[in-house]
Image (tube, coloured by chain):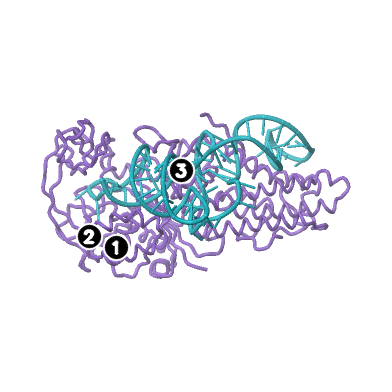
RNA sequence: GCCGGGGUAGCUCAGCUGGUUAGAGCGCCAGACUCAUAAUCUGGAGGUCGAGGGUUCAAAGCCCUCCCCCGGCACCA
């Protein structure tokens, strides 16, 4: 048994989450459930990332207080997570007091350790909105192609990288007024000081992750500013920084720690020290590729700089993007699938299967409704659901719902049980290797084997003259369902739990033996586990 | 421009430490069965593996050149 910290990237809650955001939360929930079902010691944490400029801007647009806005959004997220059966040990938010206190203490410690310095910079400022504008929030005419709506950091039309000062007729993206240059000062994290340690550390990560960091590392790490002139955020703890807040990213990543502190206080168990300070703890981070620098460089560097001996990220399970057809999900262009759209089409657990089976572990993967239709109606309903149902109905009709004895075993039975057990072993190994996309499909493959077995053995015709043989067939078919149930659990916990109740499967762990449901067990009345859905597309 | 990922059957993808006639699912065509939510099972057709060159007894896989798509390039979270 090992200790595991399972984390999902914290969703930034300026808008409703879409499939891509849900992917990490569902992956983390899946993985935590899998690990626990095999007997590991697991803590899973995530939360709403709710500070920073985009939310402040959104609040200005909606004429709301940022806190009221994120209160609403956080509540909505909790409902969404519930609908997708995501039950982490602690899903919290960056507005919680434990987090704020933790972050302030953490940065004071870094200052004490000599990793913080102050520097003056010049930025664009909107006098009307009283806000410093990040590059992206400045729009204007591209000096290269003349595109009117170029952002301060990049022109979407010609793709060139820009500086806000290069824009012709720069305007504030919020109100359209012309911004002014204004001097300000910020506190910086001295990342270069840790260059060597970070370079060494990065070598312990997946090659895929290293690829994304190559250019960053070869160009040399640069200091990273910790503070912002925003009003909405955690007040910076440094002397003279009373009117500054901490840059969202630099505080949100610390939620992985504060979330465990919070959990510890709630449960009264010694969790923080036990998990976070144990170098043997296996920490797994489910994130998108866009978050790699923060998780593979900034977070470890912060942890190193604290000199507390915190567990550095061990496995960064980053994924590529889920595309909608050929296009990237886009809120402004209404491309993609958002949580509430998804739930109006199918229940959350169907989506868990679809999203995990689509996990873009290798390259970008693309979502389309035809495939989703197939995954739900064919994989889940026709193959898995129908296999379970046909077996249990047969058992009900011919054996009064009582699992018969294995009276007349045959070579085919043995082959079948071996194949299913092999699938289960694959399933376990793939999960430990974080090949979730493949692991998730194993219960469907098991049901396919079951359907083949059942069809080839034809118990419905043998029942006429060879009942002992039929007893064995049903015995084996029922056992296979127990194994399917185990593999299905992390994917669709509620469905699997319902199935477990029906077949009287009491043990929750991996069935070690083929014979998991003893002969003589009276199973419950079978109800179809899945329903077909109708999708308009 | 630099860095990274990708380009394999109509579609979605696997295979990529080089080695039998390149695989799966869906879709399509044909057949079987009736226990089951008309579900299932069996068989078939279909690809010069982005382009060209090279290394090798042997390349989808390694090397070189080029083309196309996506992402990153650090005060966007």
- Frontmost residue, B12 versus A294: B12
Give the residue number, with chain letter if any, for mark 3: A365
CB atoms of marks 2 and 1 within 8 Å: yes
Give the residue number, with chain letter if any, for mark 1: A301
Classify 10 Å Cα crowding around label 3: few (below 14), some (14-19), many (20 and above). Answer: some
Residue at position x 58%, y 34% in the image: A533
Quadrant in the picture for residue A236: bottom left
Asked if one can make out residue A188 in the rendered structure from this viewpoint, the answer is: yes
- Frontmost residue, A48 versus A515: A515
CB atoms of marks 3 and 2 within 8 Å: no
> What is chain B's hue in the picture?
cyan
**In this rendering, do the residues under marks 3 and 2 share a single chain?**
yes
Give the residue number, with chain letter if any, for mark 2: A189
- Of the residues under marks 2 and 1, which one precedes in the sequence? 2
- Of the residues under marks 3 and 2, which one precedes in the sequence? 2
Q: Chain of mark 3?
A: A
Tell me the element at label 1: helix
Q: Is residue B37 above or below residue A310?
A: above
Tell me the element at label 3: strand
Residue at position x 47%, y 66% in the image: A3
**Could you give the CA–CA distance between mark 3 and mark 2, rounded to whole angstroms?**
36 Å
Give the chain letter for purple.
A
**In this rendering, do the residues under marks 2 and 1 share a single chain?**
yes
**Could you give the CA–CA distance between mark 1 and mark 3, rounded to whole angstroms?**
31 Å
Q: How many marks?
A: 3
Quadrant in the picture for residue A414: bottom right
- Residue A386 coordinates in the image, percent (x, y): 68, 42
- Frontmost residue, B50 versus A412: B50
- Frontmost residue, A249 versus A79: A249
């Amino acid at each position: 048994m090992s200790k595991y910290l399972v984390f999902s990237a914290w969703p930034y809650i300026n808008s409703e989450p879409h499939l891509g955001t849900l992917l990490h939360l569902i992956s983390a929930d899946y993985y935590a459930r899998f690990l626990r079902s095999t007997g590991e010691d697991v803590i899973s944490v995530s939360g709403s990332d709710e500070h920073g400029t985009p939310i402040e801007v959104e609040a200005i647009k909606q004429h709301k207080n940022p806190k009221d806005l994120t209160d609403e959004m956080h509540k909505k997220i909790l409902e969404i997570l519930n609908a997708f059966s995501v039950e982490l040990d602690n899903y919290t938010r960056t507005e919680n007091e434990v987090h704020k206190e933790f972050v302030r203490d953490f940065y004071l410690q870094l200052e004490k350790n000599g990793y913080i310095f102050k520097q003056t910079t010049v930025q664009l400022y909107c006098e009307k909105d009283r806000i410093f504008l990040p590059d992206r929030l400045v729009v204007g005419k591209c000096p290269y192609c003349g595109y009117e709506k170029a952002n301060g950091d990049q022109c979407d039309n010609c793709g060139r990288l820009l500086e806000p000062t290069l824009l012709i007729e720069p305007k504030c993206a919020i109100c359209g007024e012309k911004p002014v240059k204004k001097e300000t000062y910020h506190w910086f994290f001295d990342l270069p000081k840790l260059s060597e340690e970070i370079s060494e550390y990065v070598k312990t990560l997946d090659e895929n992750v290293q690829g994304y960091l190559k250019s960053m590392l070869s160009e040399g790490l640069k200091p990273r500013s910790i503070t912002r002139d925003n009003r909405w955020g955690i007040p910076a703890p440094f002397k003279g920084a009373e009117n500054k807040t901490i840059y969202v990213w630099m505080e949100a990543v610390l939620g992985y720690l504060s979330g465990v502190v919070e959990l510890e206080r709630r449960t009264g168990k010694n969790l923080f020290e036990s998990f976070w300070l144990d170098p043997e703890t296996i920490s797994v981070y489910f994130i998108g590729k866009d978050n790699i620098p923060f998780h593979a460089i900034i977070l470890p560097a912060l942890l190193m700089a604290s000199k507390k001996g915190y567990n550095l990220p061990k496995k960064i399970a980053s994924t590529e993007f889920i595309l909608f057809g050929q296009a990237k999900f886009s809120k402004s262009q209404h491309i993609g699938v958002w949580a509430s759209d998804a739930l109006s089409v199918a229940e959350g657990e169907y989506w868990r299967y679809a999203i995990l089976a689509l996990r873009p572990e290798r390259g970008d993967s693309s979502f389309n409704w035809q495939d989703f239709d197939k995954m739900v109606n064919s994989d889940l309903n026709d193959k898995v659901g129908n296999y379970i149902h046909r077996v249990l109905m047969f058992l009900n009709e011919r054996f009064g719902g009582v699992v018969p004895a294995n009276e007349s075993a045959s070579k085919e039975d043995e082959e079948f049980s071996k194949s299913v057990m092999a699938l289960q072993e694959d399933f376990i190994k793939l999960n430990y290797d974080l090949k979730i996309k493949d692991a998730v499909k194993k219960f469907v493959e098991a049901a396919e084997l079951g359907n083949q077995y059942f069809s080839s053995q034809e118990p419905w015709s043998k029942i006429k003259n060879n009942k002992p043989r039929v007893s064995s067939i049903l015995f084996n078919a029922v056992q296979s369902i127990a194994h399917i149930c185990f593999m299905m659990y992390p994917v669709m916990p509620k469905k699997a739990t319902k199935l477990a109740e029906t077949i009287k499967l009491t043990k929750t762990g991996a069935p070690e033996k083929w014979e998991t449901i003893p002969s003589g067990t009276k199973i419950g009345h079978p109800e179809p586990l899945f329903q077909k859905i109708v999708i308009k597309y």
